[in-house]
Amino acid sequence: MKNWNGWWIIIAVMILIDLYVFAAVRFVTNGSNEKIRLVTYSAYWAVSVMAVLVVILFPFLDFFQTHVFFRNYVFAILVGLFFAKIFASVFFLMDDIRRVFVWLMAKIFPRTGVDFVTDGGEINRSVFLSWMGIALGGGLFTALLYGFSNKYNYQVKKIQLAFDNLPSAFKGLKILQISDIHSGSFQDKQAVNRGVNMALTEVPDLVLFTGDLVNDRATEMHDYMDVFNRITAPLGVYSTLGNHDYGDYISWSSEEAKKENLERLKKIHEELGWRLLMNEHVVLEKGDEKIALIGIENWSAFGRFPKYGRMDMAYPGTEKYPFKILMSHDPSHWDAEVKVKYPDIDLMLSGHTHGMQFGLENPYFKWSPVQWFYKQWAGLYETGKQKLYVNRGYGFIGYPGRVGILPEITVFELI
């Protein structure tokens, strides 16, 4: 663990929130009989102590980090409980602020007889806000549990993209994009295979994969080679690397072991029949006309993610082609560099955000907490003649589910 101070701060925050939420639980169960209170308090602290112990032990036990079931479900449930408690605490805090305000008003204006606790059978405001917090926090947790069933609920999104400068031979070109497979999270090979069948049904001319084939280790792909090697297209299958592909988020026995893992992952792309683009470009031909496809390594505008991408290596030589597609895993690259330095990139394809695997989305509205961090986080964005598409991801990581933001297979038709 690189930052022990940060780790212990997280644990301290968890304990403080547990104490704060427990105060609300005691408050709303105050009128219950002793047996109900005992069962409620025991269950609450059993789960809370277990969650804290898991977080304390996580850096020390390799089992916690590598066991797929634990990473996918047990840890996710505990994290879900933590965020549900935070959500509920917002309402508890509102009530505490209200009560402090009432107390101050009573001290400042003692003769007004201010009393915010109502009579006549009306609901006490503190009880109401406490129950509201518990209900909404519980609702959030229930939604996260429900989301487990959506992680393989693949959605095919079909989008037409119009470009004035697209060579006529490429009019009607069908491009299939997949992104963020994260094979280390999968536990249902049949379901993953079903998604690939859906992709193949589209019969694309070109397939582009925009990074994060694995969570950390190249070995995570071993059981899924015969699933993803079925993906083919007349103009080829091209791929790039995402931030997780470099193995930066786990401890290795040596720097050499980490390098060997990356080299093995590159070889896996080759064995799948995918052409991995490492800061380079290729030329796609139809008839006598040509377009350029550029693929770079991960490049992020945020310091916590790597900047291995080199547009200064990949772009030169593409100037002469009338139409250019860029594969770049992280959509923050769009505002930070692509629009600024490369205004003749017509279409950029990204992934990375997963839409946070949580949010609300319909034809008229979309929202996810990830938009507080990424300006472009899901779907199509346009600036002038340039277009960016952010794929919501094929797989999942961390939270083994999807709420509102479903796994995506994208099919573009260029017109």
Image (cartoon, rainbow, N blue to C red):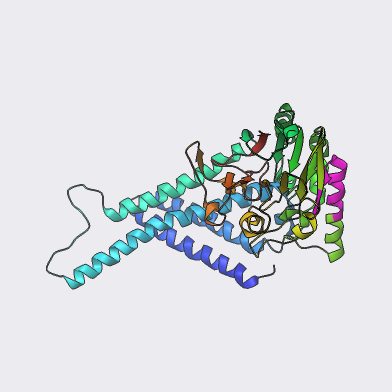
* Range of residues picked out in magenta: 263-281
**Would you say residue 264 sits in the magenta stretch?**
yes
Residue 81 pos. (x, y %):
52, 52
Q: Is residue 386 above or below residue 188?
A: below
Q: Is residue 177 above or below residue 214?
A: above
| Relative horizontal placement of residue 390, taking residue 254 as reference (left or right) | left
Residue 28 pos. (x, y %):
35, 53
The answer to which of 216 and 7 lies nearer the viewer is 216
Residue 197 pos. (x, y %):
73, 29
Q: Residue at x 54, y 40 (%)?
A: 404
Q: Is residue 104 above or below residue 349?
A: below
Q: Residue at x 66, y 43 (%)?
A: 393
**Would you say residue 54 sits in the magenta stretch?**
no
Residue 23 pos. (x, y %):
40, 60
The answer to which of 257 and 339 lies nearer the viewer is 339
Q: Residue at x 50, y 57 (%)?
A: 45
Tell me if I can see residue 61 in this picture.
yes
Q: Quadrant of residue 248?
A: bottom right
**Which quadrant of the figure contains the N terminus?**
bottom right
| Relative horizontal placement of residue 292, taking residue 381 as reference (left or right) | right
The answer to which of 96 and 196 lies nearer the viewer is 196
Q: Quadrant of residue 394?
A: top right
The number of callouts visible is: 0
Tell me if I can see residue 309 in this picture.
no
- Residue lying furthest left: 111
The answer to which of 247 and 303 lies nearer the viewer is 303
**Which quadrant of the figure contains the C terminus?**
top right
